Image: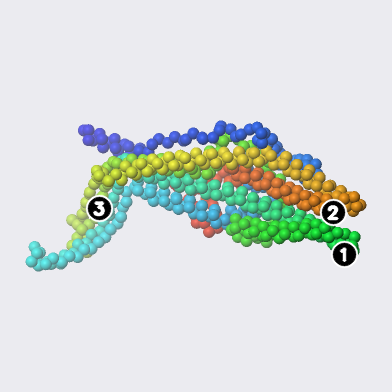
Amino acid sequence: MQKHSLIAVAVALFAAGCTMAPKYHRPDEPVSATFPTGGVYETQPGATQPGAGPTGTSTAARSANGQAAADIGWRDFFVDPRMQRLIEIALKNNRDLRVSVLNMQASAAQYRIVRAGLFPTLDAAASQSKQRTPRDLSSTPMTITNTYSVGLNASWEIDFFGRIQSLKDQALAQYLATAQARKAAEILLVSQVADQYLTVLELDDLLTVTQNTLKTSQESYRIAKLQFDNGTGSELDLRQSQTVVEQANANLQAQARLRAQGENALVLLLGEPLPADLPPGLTLNDQNLLTDIPAGLPSDLLTRRPDIMEAEQNLLAANANIGAARAAFFPKVSLTGSFGTLSPSLGGLFKPGSAAWSFAPSITLPIFEGGENLANLDLANIQKKVQIATYEKAIQTAFREVADGLAARGTYDQQIQALERNTFAEQRRLDLSNLRYTNGVDSYLSVLTAQTDLYSSQQSLITARMQRLQNLVDLYQALGGGWIERAGEQPRPADAPVDYGAASAPVAASAAAAG
């Protein structure tokens, strides 16, 4: 009676799909409950952007209207039609993204392989065997015998202790982790294309400033040379004016090189050459990105950042692996059997009385494994601790990225306004220095210094504007934005079907979850 009760309990446990994996508890967040406040975080921008006028006044910009980054489509965040087209191309052709999709599909196939171990296997088999026995050893006059068989073979490992179930849970969690990795790769690609596009626009503006500076300095050099040739100017003035020309020439070549390399980097992200029919784009100062996306709470990142969700799925996989390692200490119960027909002649296979069958249950209990099972369990526990630390680090990294973005967002507007006022002042200084030099009140050195300082100020202003825009893009990504195309769309599952050119047919989450 006790034996039958134990069998009934084991069958009930198997039917319930129980495993020996430890109960999962999500680790506590190893960060503050809120993002930093005060200081550089205090002055977060509203729906405004720095103005381009001499006084550095702000102009109206588009507002996020309190929407979280994850709810804002990338076509709503970016308004430049050229940038939108480039992002669209990259999402279809980028090879890194394609690899992440294929990795997800490979992981789904691996999950199905492991899941198949829960079910019996059934094979059809047919065979013939021919044997010759020496006459002096044969009990019959026949020395050559034939045996023909045809039938079905079945085998099944009954997962009483949840070993296969734990392995299936591990494979499913690993699949879901790769799906989140694919989502993170897509979000990152959107921001990478935008950042690189903004870098190219910055270099265009720097080239324009350098070309204007070169043109002005060449005219000054021409006048200084004419005066030197006529004996009314000094060689010192001539050489001072020449330094500006040569410096601008050198900068022009360096910036042209960086511009070409920046476009090459953009082409790599796109996965194809730049199309000739791209729509016209906006200037760097007209990008008008959303500036007031709310940061929310750090706990929001757990459901908005795919890299954090990927780390948690890897932790769940490690947790399930402990169940498989524990189950290895317990017996394995297997059932094998066959049913068919057996006959000494091919024609007699299906005659009455030719039926044959076999049934062979087996149980294997580990007794001595040289410490292998214990070592596997220790390894599984250590791997779980590694994944806990990795998950906590993912949260800390996300917190740091958002905090850095908020610190930058709280300071760039004031920095750019100061640079705009400085550039206006440097321009007036150059104009006045030129006037004083022309009237013989001051030396050419003051003109040279003012011209050099204006050029440096203009470059600093352009770079700061680009960095401000890139920070807004990166903060949008850090808060989980870039997964949906337009606001109001239902977010796709992380393993949603996609069409990425050569990428093969995807596998939906529902197929994986069915097991």
The residue that appears at 54% across and 47% down in the rendered structure is 183
28 over 458 or under it: above or below = above
- Disc 3 marks which residue? 338
In the image shown, does 31 or 508 lie closer to the viewer? 31
Gap between marks 3 and 1, in whole Å?
Answer: 110 Å
In the rendered structure, which amino acid carries the disc numbered 3? Ser
Q: How far from the left and from the top, in percent, is residue 208?
A: 76, 56
Where, by quadrant of the figure, is residue 317 drawn? top left
- Disc 2 marks which residue? 444
What is the image's colouring? rainbow
Q: How many marks?
A: 3
N-term-proximal mark, 1 vs 2? 1
Q: Secondary structure at mark 1?
A: helix
Q: How far from the left and from the top, in percent, is residue 274?
A: 65, 60
In the rendered structure, which amino acid carries the disc numbered 1? Asp
The residue that appears at 49% across and 44% down in the rendered structure is 310
Closer to the eye: label 3 or 1 = 1
- Disc 1 marks which residue? 229
Gap between marks 1 and 2, in whole Å?
Answer: 17 Å
